[in-house]
Image: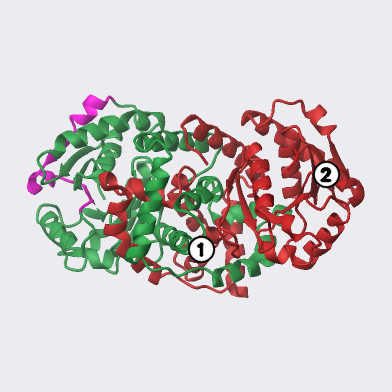
Chain colours: A red, B green
Amino acid sequence: MADIRNVAVIGGGLIGASWAALFVAQGLSVRVHEPDGNTADQVAARVRAAWPDLQALGLTDLDVDKALARLVVTPDMSLACQDIDFVQECGPDRLEVKHAIIARVESCIAPETVIASSSSALLPSEIQARASHPGRILVGHPFNPPHLIPLVELVAGQATTPQAVEAARAFYENLGREVIVPQRELRGHVANRLTAALYREAVHLVAEGVASVADVDRAVSAGPGLRWALMGPHLTYHLGGGAGGFRHYITHLGPAQQARWAELGSPTLDTATIDALIAGVEDELAALDADTLPERRDAALVGLLQLKQRLGFGG
Amino acid sequence: MADIRNVAVIGGGLIGASWAALFVAQGLSVRVHEPDGNTADQVAARVRAAWPDLQALGLTDLDVDKALARLVVTPDMSLACQDIDFVQECGPDRLEVKHAIIARVESCIAPETVIASSSSALLPSEIQARASHPGRILVGHPFNPPHLIPLVELVAGQATTPQAVEAARAFYENLGREVIVPQRELRGHVANRLTAALYREAVHLVAEGVASVADVDRAVSAGPGLRWALMGPHLTYHLGGGAGGFRHYITHLGPAQQARWAELGSPTLDTATIDALIAGVEDELAALDADTLPERRDAALVGLLQLKQRLGFGG
């Protein structure tokens, strides 16, 4: 596959603008397709806001104004897709919308150009189902915000070719992303299944009145969340196992772990539960500086990623 | 309750030594009870190793040698418990062992002195069941390593008095800990239930061949784990909801979340699964600098906690 120089981003929302920032930071030319005429300024503002972070992480040494000259935001799909080498699709996460977007994109690009969908809720086989050239369609799922969180889950559908997977892997890895390729498509891919599992128990504990929303959040961010920023659960248990490592952990504490699984909750997101969660989040937000939270999060993510680089933590 | 000046730590292993480091760093006098005669040097070495981190986090301005003069490690329970104001129990996590320890401790301390167990697997009602004075017994559950991870889960048993809970809360908060008090005792308290829920799905994905151990770990540490170090799941979803915040997230993406819950796995830790997990961890360790991992983890935790302090992230 030829070098990727020109990328189309379909959708100029939070995720699309963040991808666009990363792409232009890395020297690519980017066309953002977005029907909303007010979006061009918003996307440019988001790219400018992201620039100091991208510089701090060593993801760009370019001048932001020169980079923005390689960014076009347009409601014209054929202009957005002209001479494009890679498509990052960031439209609404509904299947009929995805199918409509892909039909329009396919009508404007070469048959082998990879289309990666940012979808978190849909499976690649569903997304590619009605495509003219389904083999080049896959999921390239980022985490918010994509220009800061390194993980990209690359998921093939039943029709996706190995060539498309490898082209997308090379593309994302060249951009400094941490790519994982699940062996099989599953609802939520990998990371959001882990997140959903944790969140199910979080909702159970709030719904049962065991802990407030704020205490559940604090139980993560002042506890195991600190370790998960550095290492996943297996490596964490490995260190918890002392000299015997993970083998010691799993043989000695595996039974307690399994007993815990049997007692986890199965909550329902009914109206009363949703109301309790919303009220709990409002209480939590009232006790902190909520307005500056997105900026502080980004600053903290940059510092955390620099710290991990310095101490040799991959991923 | 009187000021706490003298603390007994029952058990001189990883957790006990880390608690002891925090306690002496904060100016307390500490007696560590440990039957193993070789432990005194190990505990002192662990306190010395922890000192630069405790200084960096503003948790001590004391000289380590002067602090170590207030640390006694002894196999003599009556010496360990003499004139003690608070007991942090860190023995093996088996009920019959806890009961035996508590009987010995109770025979040496005043009837109102609080005994906090570091237990992760047992419930406070179980631990206090055979005590002479069960009202002062509770769980004060830390995360490894306790001198660095701020979270302490304070859990009352059926017999625990509110006075004991408040005394323990004040004690831990004075030590700079982030204390949560679940409204009810449950297996795994709060944080380890969330951890277990995530880990159940992690094991499912490995057992089903969807992802390797290393990829599951990377899916956490290069993805949502980075955000969980700063904010729990609710605040994370709040930011993911854009301008509409958590309410927008839960009303629009709640159904997708719930659909995901229905598809999560229920693995069993049978021999084949355990073998696959151990082999996967060995592969993962072979690809990184495993020997320096504990030191790098501690250095990264210190940097991360400093970063959170600087940017106003509580917990």
Q: Chain of mark 2?
A: A
Q: CA distance from mark 1 to mark 2?
A: 38 Å
Proximity of marks 1 and 2: CB atoms separated by less than 8 Å: no
Queried whether the magenta region covers residue A23, the answer comes back as no
**B62 or B230: nearer the viewer:** B230
* Side of B163 where B33 appears, left or right: left
Q: Secondary structure at mark 2?
A: loop
x and y percentages locating residue B175 in the rendered image: 35, 41
Residue drawn at x 23%, y 51% is B90
Q: Which residue is mark 2?
A: A84
Name which of mark 1 and mark 2 comes first in the sequence: 2
The amino acid on which the numbered mark 1 sits, given as a three-letter code, is Ala
Q: Is residue A310 above or below residue A300?
A: above
x and y percentages locating residue A131 in the rendered image: 79, 63
x and y percentages locating residue A174 in the rendered image: 65, 37
| Label 2: few (<14), some (14–19) or many (≥20) C-alpha neighbours in 10 Å | many
Report the span colored magenta: B63-91
Which is more foreground, mark 1 or mark 2? Answer: 2
Q: Which residue is mark 1?
A: A197
The amino acid on which the numbered mark 2 sits, given as a three-letter code, is Ile
Residue drawn at x 57%, y 58% is A192
| Label 1: few (<14), some (14–19) or many (≥20) C-alpha neighbours in 10 Å | many
Quadrant of the rendered structure where residue A51 is?
A: top right
* Residue A121 visible in rendering: yes
Q: Secondary structure at mark 1?
A: helix
